[in-house]
Amino acid sequence: MKIAVYDCVTGDALTEKYGRTGPLIIKWIARYLPEATFSSIHIAGNETPPLPQDVDGIIISGSEKGVYDDTPWMQPLRENLLEMKSAGVAMFGICFGHQIMADVFGGKADKSDKGFVTGTRQFRSRGTNVTAYLAHQDQVTDVPIGAEVIASAAYCPVAALSYDFPAMSVQFHPEYNREFASDLIDMFGEELMSEEQLRGARDSLSIETDEGLWCEEVSDFFRKHCKVA
């Protein structure tokens, strides 16, 4: 099973400390999917995405960019996602990945009037309360035809989507841990949030989250949909 992680982060102080986003996502999921071989493609660094016949699945990471930004790598990514869909390649999106999948497949993502949100938040997912780390202002605002909302919250109605083809995505960041989320707030919080929002984000980190959040769901998804013997 070959899975490519599309790293859509250009680079910032967090990547200087923790390394590239692609390997962080691989570290998060690989322990639950030991039969898979992973690769990381720096899409935001203009590396060429793989052809559908060269992978069994893809994971699209978060990004500091929005789907509305004009970047050299955005249109090739869009075209590649449509090729992957046509070929039936399984795909999973995180944050920006969630948004660009919705945008490419007939929905819409845009900047929310609720402002930048980070720290931890609770979502309702298939009848269960889930607490997850997050860092975003953009949200999916229109759900593509054929997609089902499978997680939501009052401030984020479309927190996760399941499609009627092999695709699934989440707005939150299951690959984050508390240290990473705390550093994110310290590095970027003051320029993106009010003092009240910043205090709330820091306080929210006292809430426990599952370090294996969505690992089983994503692993089972790829096992089900990847075209391997």
Image: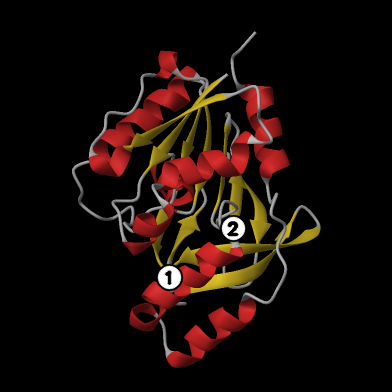
As drawn, the label of residue 112 is 1
Vertical order, 163 against 90 (above or below): below
| Nearer to me, 111 or 197 | 197
Vertical order, 87 against 158 (above or below): above
Farthest right residue in view: 127
Marks 2 and 1, the one that precedes in the sequence: 1
- Identify the image quadrant of the C terminus: top right
Farthest bottom residue in view: 195
- Assign a secondary structure to mark 2: loop
Query: Mark 1 is on which residue type?
Result: Ser
Q: CA distance from mark 2 to mark 1?
A: 13 Å
The percent position of residue 216, horizontal first and vertical second, equals 72, 40
| Nearer to me, 189 or 102 | 189
Can you see residue 182? yes
The percent position of residue 1, horizontal first and vertical second, equals 58, 18
Left or right of 40? Residue 46 is left
- Assign a secondary structure to mark 1: loop
Vertical order, 83 against 176 (above or below): above
The percent position of residue 164, horizontal first and vertical second, equals 60, 33
Identify residue for label 2. 159
Left or right of 46? Residue 131 is right
The residue sitting at 59% across, 44% down in the picture is 28
The residue sitting at 41% across, 56% down in the picture is 109
Query: Mark 2 is on which residue type?
Result: Ala
The percent position of residue 19, horizontal first and vertical second, equals 40, 50
As drawn, the label of residue 145 is none
Mark 2 is surrounded, within 10 Å at the Cα level, by few (under 14), some (14 to 19) or many (20 or more) other residues, namely: many
Farthest top residue in view: 229
